Each structure stands twice: as C-alpha cells, then as structure tokens.
Image (tube, helix red, strand yellow):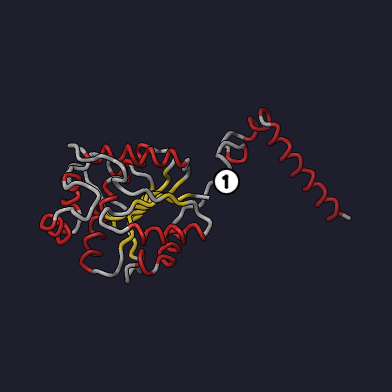
Amino acid sequence: MTSLVLLRDPFQDAWGWNQLALELRDMGRRVLSPGLGDGVPCAAGEPSRALLRGLERRIQDAGVSRAVLVCSGYAGMLAPALAERMPSVFSRIIFLDAALPEQGKSYLDVCPPPLADRIRAVGTGDAALPFKAFEEPYAGPEQRAWPASLCLTSEEEPAAVSFGRKRAETLGVEWRCVDLTGSPVLARAGDLARALVSFDPPEPLGDGTGCGRSRMPHDMRMAYCAHYRRRQALAETSCDSHTSRSIH
C-alpha cells in the first residue's frame, strides 16, 4: 500500500499534523511526517540544500518506498526537488494549499501577496527556518519534470483560492478545490485524511516485470516464457472443457 510523506509548512504546529498522521494510519497507511529544519543547520547561504539533504536522509532511514508526497505552504518549494532526488520513492505530489514553485522565484514571490507582506513585516521568529529560506530562488526541476501533481486549495479564503488556481493553471498543474474550511488539519483531520486517500493513485500490480504485463509479441512469449505457456495451456483446456459440455 502507498505510503504518505507529510511535509508541513514551518509556520504550522506539529500537533495538528500528528493528528492527521494518526487518522491516515488508522486507514492502514504508512505515514512519515518529518519537520522542516528538525536538527538541520540551515543558516547558510542556500538553506534548501541542507533541508533537502536532511529530508532525504530521514526518508531513507525510514525505508519509505512507493510514496505520495503531501506538502503544505513553504514545503511546496522543496517537494519537486525532493521527488527528483528520490524518483524511485515518489509517484505523486499533492500540493495542499502549498506554494507552486517557479524557476528563479522565491517563496515570497509565489505565495499570496498578503502572506508575503506579513512574513516581511513580522519575520520568521515562529518558524524553524531562517528568513533567507523564504528569499532563496527556486532552482529545482521545472514543472514538466515533476511526477504526477495535484494542487488542492481550500474554499475558506476566496482570494487565496483564486490565486492558487491561477498559479496552477499557469503552470499546467491539475487543480481541485476541496472543502478544507475550519482549519481541517487541527479540527477535521479525519475529513482531510479521507480526501488525501481518495486522490491516492492505485498501486501497480506486481513489480511491473511479470509476463502478464509484458508487451512482447505472443509468439515470442510462447517461445521464451514457461509461465506464459502454462497460462495459455490452462486457458485452452478450460475452453475445450466448456465446448465439450456445450456439445453434449
């Protein structure tokens, strides 16, 4: 079953996201929720590099595979680069009211202007990251190189919804508006968990290497694959048996 890696915005409290993780685990999902900047010295000139190294290490240590990456707020600036560094792990990114990064632009350039104004005015004292992280230009992969991506925005703030939708349409990212009113991460974690699971892509059957999924022509499969020959023989036997019963 697909795992979920939750990357919360550094301004958001961990408690609500822990509740979301519990709800997802109750649904049978494996969940990892690493905090941005947890134990990572990122006061250098390029905080994103240190953050990505720390996240990659946490995910590798946890043994996560076949996962969906769910990001919120500033974490959207890191998600495509993290997915690029771990292509065998992440099959999908869900931007949950998250920044949609654009080459050469910082978080302050791509987040809603009122939020950018508040960050500039108040600073980042409540976040685990230095202010430089929000000014750093995005240098990750372009949108066409991202894995399958989905942008979810809430209906709580019409201006923010309009901003998020316009950004998604400009970048060519699939966009959907869901009912996330009432701070669901804190108060409606179960509803949010069900919404996230509903967008989870189906897990592939097997490892994709079996003869049943091969595009090799029938004659070659009959010549080289004993398992395929047995399947064909069983199918023919079943067909002969059905024909015999029909005649009699």
Residue sitting at x 57%, y 46%: 205
Counting the numbered discs, the total is 1
Q: In this view, does 94 lie to the left or right of 248?
A: left
Quadrant of res 168: bottom left
Where in the figure is residue 222, as x and y percent of width and height? 68, 32
The extreme front residue here reads 39
Residue sitting at x 27%, y 41%: 142
Where in the figure is residue 69, as x and y percent of width and height? 39, 49
Quadrant of res 213: top right
Task: Give the answer, above or below, for where 181 lies relative to 22.
Answer: below
Q: Within 10 angstroms of label 1, few (less than 14), some, or many (20 or more) residues?
A: few
Pick the front one: 177 or 96: 96
Where in the figure is residue 243, as x and y percent of width and height? 81, 51
The extreme top residue here reads 224
Task: Give the answer, above or below, for where 161 lies relative to 10.
Answer: below
The quarter of the picture where the C terminus appears is bottom right
Residue sitting at x 23%, y 53%: 127
Residue sitting at x 30%, y 62%: 153
Pick the front one: 243 or 90: 90
Pick the front one: 125 or 131: 125
The amino acid type, in three-letter code, at marker 1 is: Leu
Where in the figure is residue 190, as x and y percent of width and height? 44, 66
Quadrant of res 223: top right
Element type at marker 1? loop
Q: In this view, does 112 lie to the left or right of 202?
A: left
**Which residue was labeled with disc 1?**
205
Pick the front one: 244 or 69: 69
The extreme right residue here reads 248
Q: Is residue 53 left or right of residue 163?
A: right
